[in-house]
Amino acid sequence: MTTPDDEIMCDCSGTTKAKIMSLVEQGITTLDDISRKTGTNSGCGACEYDVQEFLDHIIDTNDS
């Protein structure tokens, strides 16, 4: 059984929500930096909107 954190955000790199959350906790907060660390958004690019939206949500939630 998978958890929501195991949800894959980028099919090309296999990057999960949990991986993105972990990187944000380490201070990596831009799509470009996430991409450099994981390969997200460097293949087909179909995940760009979803990853950016998720990233914005995490940052907004952490700022509250």
Image (cartoon, rainbow, N blue to C red):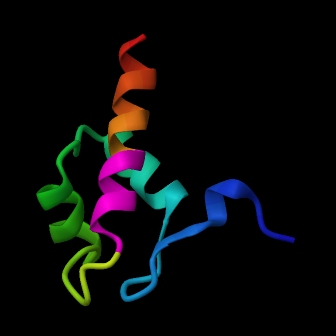
Quick check: is 39 in the magenta stretch? Answer: no
Q: Is residue 12 above or below residue 39?
A: below
State the residue at coordinates (24%, 38%): 27
State the residue at coordinates (35%, 45%): 55
Q: Quadrant of the N terminus?
A: bottom right
Q: Is residue 45 left or right of residue 63?
A: left
Considering depth in this image, is 51 or 35 the residue closer to the camera? Answer: 51
State the residue at coordinates (15%, 57%): 33
Say which quarter of the image contains residue 45: bottom left
Residue 63 spot, x, y in % from top left: 36, 15
Q: Is residue 54 left or right of residue 56?
A: right
Say which quarter of the image contains residue 43: bottom left
Over which residues does the magenta segment extend? 47-54
Residue 4 spot, x, y in % from top left: 69, 56
Name the chief secondary structure element in magenta. Answer: helix
Q: Spot the residue most to the top.
A: 64
